[in-house]
Image: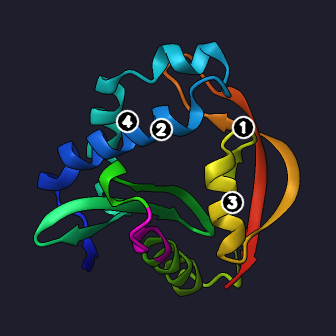
Amino acid sequence: MELRAAVSGDAGVVAGIWYAGWRDGHWGHIPEALVAVRTRESFDLRAAERVGDTTVCTVDGRVVGFVMVVGDEVEQVYLASDQRGSGLAAELLAEAERQVRANGHSRAWLAVVEGNARARRFYERQGWVSEGPFDYQASSADGPIAVPCLRYAKPV
């Protein structure tokens, strides 16, 4: 396993992992307005735009997961479905925490859709604590879409 900064050539693989994982964790738990705008193509565009915020995890040279960190927020943590249970997600999250600390923050936060029980259990096992509900403002071409989430935080 290797963690490295993403390069533009990783964007397509990142988008595929992101789209599949997003559907797994969010389907049925988010507003239909967000489902309508989060097409596969939208993930391709967003992954390409976000290369600079992305760290990828590779196994034998193959990108199998990624994190995106901006400031004190861990914005995205995704692992290819065939890698779930491997321990790599914990490595990615630890890297995200390290980046938040390197960004000068002592506390990291992230948003989790309340119905995504698998992700919530994972974060809790890693020492993250729910600070309660809030509406995350997901970006779209038509303006922000409020997504009911839980805010998780952890000292770093």
- Scheme of colours in the image: rainbow
Q: CA distance from mark 3 to mark 4?
A: 21 Å
Mark 4 and mark 2 in contact? Answer it, CB < 8 Å: yes
> Would you call the spot at circle 2 few (<14 residues within 10 Å), some (14-19), or many (20 or more)?
some
Q: CA distance from mark 1 to mark 4?
A: 17 Å
Eyeballing the image, is 120 above or below 107? above
Residue range (magenta): 85-90
Q: Report which residue position mark 4 lands on.
A: 19
- Any magenta on residue 88? yes
Front of the two marks 2 and 1: 1
Q: Report which residue position mark 2 lands on.
A: 22
Q: Report which residue position mark 1 lands on.
A: 115
Eyeballing the image, is 74 above or below 80? below
> Would you call the spot at circle 1 few (<14 residues within 10 Å), some (14-19), or many (20 or more)?
some
Q: Report which residue position mark 3 lands on.
A: 121
Front of the two marks 3 and 4: 3
- Kind of element beneath mark 4: helix
Q: Earlier in the sequence, mark 1 or mark 4?
A: 4
Q: CA distance from mark 2 to mark 3?
A: 16 Å
What type is the residue that disc 3 sits on? Arg
